[in-house]
Every structure is written in structure tokens, then in C-alpha cells.
Amino acid sequence: MTETELLTWVRGPGFQIATIIFVLGIILRLFEILMLGRKANLAEPKGSEMSSGLRTVFSRTIPDASTFKRSAFTVTAGYIFHIGLFVVIFLFAPHILLFKDIIGFGWPALPSTVIDATAVVTIITLVIVLVHRLRDPVKRFLSTFDDYLGWFVTILPLITGYIAFHRIGMSAPSLIAIHILSVELLMVVFPFTKLMHMFTLILARWYNGAISGYRGVQS
Amino acid sequence: MSASFEKGYNALKEQVDSTVAAFFSSCVHCGMCADACLFYTETGAPERTPIHKTEPLRRVWKQEYTLLGRIGKLFGIGEKVTDEMMEQWETLIYDSCTLCGRCTMVCPVGNDIAGMIRKTREGMAAAGHAPPGLIGATKRAVTIGSPMGVKLPALKAQIAHVEKDSGIKIPLDVEGADYMLLLSSMEIMNFPEFIDAVAKIFKHANVSWTISSEAFEATNSGIQIGASDIAAELVQRIVDAAAKLKVKNVISPECGHAYMAIRWDGPNLIGKSFDFKVVHILELLDDLRQQGRLKINGRLKERVTYHDPCQIARRGGVIDEPRNLIGMFADNFVEMPETGKMNWCCGAGGGVSSNERADEIRLQVFQRKKDQLDAIHVDGIISACSNCRIHLEDGLEEYHMEIPLLSLTETLAENLEES
């Protein structure tokens, strides 16, 4: 396979397969959760489930002051790499072109130098996060293969993207092909790992807020 | 109670619902729940991280309710729940967790971790891996009617004392009363002043009330050990008594888990809405305050704080009421650094105090409460749970601190205008 053939495959059939697994996988996982259902609460409510649930979906993004103090590293590093990922994935001009191709509309991009710097910060933060996971007694104790796999498939597209952007080592088509392949790996793995929290946390936070709100407590 | 691993496993399966599945799918092992749990912060033991305590339930969810887990199970791979594993988890789930729910408030993905530990207990109890102390208390609750073995004659004796001291008649089995008061065994045996205080306040505010001789026990060991069938039986006794006496309201006393049991879990345990309302004594008192039926003349000059019992505040929703009431008589009220829904547990709720095996650790983790108290220098701690009260007194003694413990209801009664 020539590098052009490789690039054509990862952009065509490869991307289609990854997208199908990604989308169907997510639907399957969400269905798997929701079809379990939950029992109606027979106790007389003291507050609203719906509004409290919706509130918590957003409010849980920001920890209260004392919790922030206790978990300052986890919270700060978490903010940095999540925002970094968002910026790099959604605000880079070539990515926006791809989204425009798929969904039919685009949005303004950030200058590529900003994206470049953000990618570096995000990669460094993810490395620090991994070191912290390996050294912190609680995180090391809790961590499983799933956590490390999720970390690996997340940092890989950042690194391959960075290398492709700076054309380091290989010709452009090969670098782009490797970058797209790493994204496809992420998409295929996504529904079956912790990465699913991107979607399920909306459910989890809603349930949390609903359970508390029903009893008249804002969580 | 005949227990077996199969029963335990099936009980865990029954506990899995969409909330549990969403929670486990979302956990990214960030470890923030450890920082929110006094059993971790005061011991530094990573295995006491709240989410780790739910591991038996997580494995059942994964193997039984996810596609990947089921495929894995077919090929004999994946982590299984075994009897040995459950045995290993027993001290984590019962001795190192008070179901206080602080972890639930900080989890960034929104997991109700305390709720999941509560569910895990259902499997543990059914498999026979519960602490002997709690099993004993639960058996006494079923056979005698009280976890501490308090029988009707003991209650009648305490009532006679209270009537003699206060000159107020305690209404027993009065049909058609507005309110039926429940009591915890701890109140009957250790703090009969509570009965006295309620009698004074109700006379002062002209509340029609009674105590049932058939269901006066408010506590529910079934929800602490995690045996829904037993918990339901204990709730049913109260429901039957309320129907027999035709009362419109049932009052949950100064006890945290009793409120959870009757107010929030009760109807769900018996599978039927109640025909009466459940109110916590603090909710009722605050209601009386709003109606202007409480006349205060005494003032509390000392610097006091309020300890929120977890099941009443964070898990129960009674947070403003105690502060409104304290505001009526206290001149110098101060909040602890983290308070209300973020208060730290005393360390002995959720069945920990009935579990002698946990005596050492509950006093060790009291350090958290000590730190909170050291920051505010108070002359008195007001609370509204006799279990918190006993343990706070224990902890203060252990750490050589001399701060008196006050019951909110009793303190209010002392400061009422003589009627």
C-alpha cells in the first residue's frame, strides 16, 4: 500500500467504520443504561427532580471552595486538559472543515499558532496527569487498564497531530494518515471505555441532582 | 435470616438500575471522593476511597448488564464477585462508611456514591457478610421491636418519670391525635429529657399528639444493615399503628437514619404511599415558629454551633429549619467551616455505632470533627440526632475536649415562655 492509498483508506472506509462503531457503540451503551430504568419514588417530594437535576448537570462543573482546596491538582489539571482538548478538536481550521463536510456547517477557527500552543499545553498536562496517577496513592490504587487505555488513546491523536502539523520525520500524507488512524482508534475504543463519561456524566449528574432535589437539597 | 452467596449475588443484581449504570459508566477514578471522606482523610488508607467500597456492585453491573461484560463472562474473563471477595469488603462497607453522602456531593461526574454503598449493603447482608453487632441489633429490632432491646414497660417507666418530673401527661395511644411521635431507643434509655421537652413544647403550642404503644421505635436497623425486607417490616409496624390511631402525621425524632427510613425510604420499602405525612421534629417546630406558636423568653448567651446530622441535612433536606429555630434563642451562633449539606459526619452513623468492631476507627476519624471544632472555639454544640450526640460526646472525651452537647429540641424547650 502506498502512502496515498493509505491516506485514501483512512479518510474513506477507515473513517466510515470508525464512525459507525463510535456512533452505534455510544447508542448501545446509552440504551444499555437507560433501559434498566428506575423505580418511581413513592415518598412525598420536598422539591423538584427535573430542575434540580438540570441544575446539577451544570453546577457540578465547578467544585465548592473547600472541595477545590482539597483536590486542587485534580481539578486544575482536569480543567486544563479538558478545555485544551475542546479547543484543539473543535477550533482548529482543518478540523472545522471536516465537521463542515459531515454536518454541513462550520464555525470560526482560532489561529493555528494558538492551537499549536494549546496542543503542547494539553500534551504536557496529560503527561503530568499520568505521572500523578502513577504516584498518588489513591489514584494508583484505583486505576485499572481501562484508565491507562483511555489516557493512551486520548494523548495519541494530540501527539500525532502535533507531529503532522510540524511535518516531523515523514512526508505529509503519511503523517496525516497516522494522525487520522490514531483518531479512529480513539473513536473505536471510546464507547467501551471510561471515555464514555463524556456522555454518561450528563445522566449521572442529572440523577445526582434529582435524588437530592427530590429531598429538597441542592447538590 | 438465612444467608448465602447466591442470595447476596441476586440481591446485588436487583439493586442495579439506570442510576447505578450511569454512575459506574461515568467514574474516571479521579479520587476526589477520597478527599471528601473522613475515613480516608483521617487514615490515609487508599482502600477506603468511597468508590472502591462499591466494587462488588460494580462487578455485578459490569458482568450482568453490559455487553462487553457479558461477553467476557461467557469466556470466563473479567472480574467476578466471589464470597471471599465480599468477605474482604465487609469492613470497608460497614466499618469505614457511615453513608454520610459527602462523596456524593463532590463527585465531579455526579455519582451518588453513598447511595451505591447503601445498595451494596443489600448484597452483603443477604450473603451473610454483615458485622455481628449490626446483625444482633437487627434481630432485636425484629423480635423485640428495638435494636437496643427496649420494650414497652421500659418506655412506660420512662414516661412515668417524665410525667412525675414535669407534671405533664404524656398521651399514650390517643386515637385521632394530629401527630404520632416516634422515639429512638437511645432517646428512651439515655435522653428521656427529649420526651419531656416535646411534651412541654406541644403543651405550650397546643399540639395534639400521642405515642403508640405498638410502634414507638423510630430507628430502623434494616436500612443500616441493608436488608430491605426487614426494613419494610419495621416501617409497616409504624404504618399499621398510624392507621389504628387514625393520626394525620407521624413525627420522626432527633435521629438521623430514622428520618431517612420513615420519610424517604419508608413508602418505597413497603411499595405504597403513606396515608399520613411524615415530618421531622425540627420541621414541625419550625412550622410552629412560623405560625407564631412558639414564645421564647430565655436567651442562650454562650457561643454555640450546630452539627448537621448527615441523614437529616445532606441526605434528608432539613437544613434551614434548625438554623431558624436556633436563631430564636441563641445570641452567639457560629457555623463550622464546612456546614449544612457539606458538613462532616461525626463518624458513627449508618450503623457504625452498633458495630463494636468499628469502635477504634470511629474515634480515629473523629479527628475531622475535632479540626472543625478547633477552628471556631464554641461553648456548646447543638445537634438533632441522639446517635451523633452520643458519639460526639465520646469523641470529645477521647480528645480531651470539654464542650457540652445540646439537643435542639431540649434547648428550645428550656427557653420557652412559661405557659
Image (cartoon, rainbow, N blue to C red):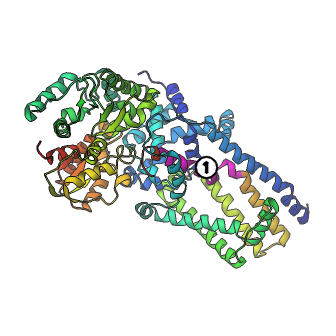
The question of residue A70 being in magenta is answered with no
Residue at the spot of label 1: A200
Pick the quarter of the image with the C terminus of chain B. top left
Amino acid marked by disc 1: Thr
Q: How many marks?
A: 1
Of B187 and B267, which appears nearest the observer? Answer: B267
B311 vs B299, nearest the viewer: B299
Q: Residue at horizontal 10%, vertical 35%?
A: B166
Q: Is residue B401 above or below residue A89?
A: above
Nearest the viewer among B145 and B396 is: B145
Q: Which chain is disc 1 placed on?
A: A
Q: Is A217 placed left or right of A143 in the picture?
A: left
Q: Secondary structure at mark 1?
A: helix
The main secondary structure of the magenta stretch is: helix
Residue A47 location in percent, x, y? Answer: 45, 45
Where A11 sits versus B85, above or below?
below
Residue count near mark 1 (Cα–Cα under 10 Å), binned few <14, some 14–19, many ≥20: many
Q: Nearer the viewer, residue B282 or B382?
A: B282
Task: Give percent across and percent down for residue B158.
Answer: 15, 29
Viewed as shown, does residue B46 lie left or right of B368?
right
Res B139 quadrant in image: top left
Residue A190 is covered by the magenta coloring: yes
Locate residue A196, reporting x and y percent.
Answer: 64, 51
Residue B90, image x and y in percent?
Answer: 42, 37
Residue B262 visible: yes
Look at the picture and state if B275 lies above or below B37.
above
Q: Residue at x 58, y 51 (%)?
A: A201
Q: Is residue B129 visible?
A: no
Q: Which residues are magenta?
A: A189-211
Q: Residue drawn at (21%, 25%), measured in percent from left and top?
A: B172
